[in-house]
């Protein structure tokens, strides 16, 4: 019985440390990256993994009833809302005209490859 308690506490601690690591990486990305698109990616991916790990640590610590069940519901809510929120932030930034950095562009409306479009434009200008 003591070994089971020790394993449970160790698992909880490892999951909490993993969660804090991912949350810290997401925070550093938020502070370091230059624009909304990079920041959105840096916060949505690690935040989902980090917070899910902390929720799983809560589930392991409290068990399947009460607060443990709340942790599982939290994970479900997290997986439904974070990708949707990141997508909405990206679309809002694109619609308000926030540019990408460097030579990155949005895909063309016709479904064509951007490189093919650029090559066609370059050939037309050379002719």
Image (cartoon, grey):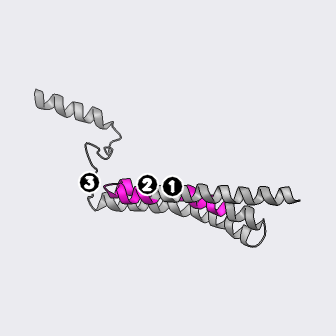
> Circle 2 — which element?
helix
Judged by depth in the image, the label closer to the viewer, 3 or 2, is 2
Looking at the picture, tell me which residue is in the foreground, 110 or 29.
29
Residue 52 shown left or right of residue 121 in the figure: right
Q: Rate crowding at label 1 as few (under 14), some (14 to 19) or many (20 or more) other CA atoms within 10 Å.
A: many
Task: State how far apart marks 3 and 2 are (Cα).
Answer: 18 Å
Q: Can you tell which mark lies on residue 99? A: 3
- Magenta region: 27-56
Mark 1–mark 2 CB contact (< 8 Å): yes
**N-term mark: 3 or 2:** 2
Reading the image, the residue beneath label 1 is 46
> Residue 111: image x %, image y %?
36, 40
Are the residues flagged by discs 3 and 2 in contact, CB closer than 8 Å? Answer: no
The tag earlier along the polypeptide, 1 or 3, is: 1
Q: Which residue is mark 2?
A: 42
Seen from the viewer's position, the closer of residues 41 and 24 is 24
Quarter placement of the C terminus:
top left
Looking at this view, is 17 or 43 the one in front?
A: 17
Lateral position of residue 90 relative to residue 55, left or right: left
Q: Main secondary structure of the magenta part?
A: helix
């Amino acid at each position: 019985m003591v070994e089971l308690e020790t394993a449970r506490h160790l698992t909880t601690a490892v999951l909490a440390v993993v969660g804090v690591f991912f949350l810290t990486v997401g925070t550093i990305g938020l502070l370091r990256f230059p624009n909304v698109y990079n920041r959105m990616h840096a916060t949505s991916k690690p935040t989902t993994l980090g917070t899910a790990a902390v929720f799983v640590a809560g589930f392991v610590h409290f068990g399947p009833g009460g607060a443990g069940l709340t942790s599982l519901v939290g994970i479900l809510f997290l997986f439904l809302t974070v990708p949707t929120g990141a997508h909405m932030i990206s679309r809002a930034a694109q619609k308000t005209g926030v540019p990408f950095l460097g030579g990155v562009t949005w895909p063309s409306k016709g479904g064509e490859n951007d490189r093919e479009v650029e090559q066609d434009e370059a050939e037309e200008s050379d002719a």
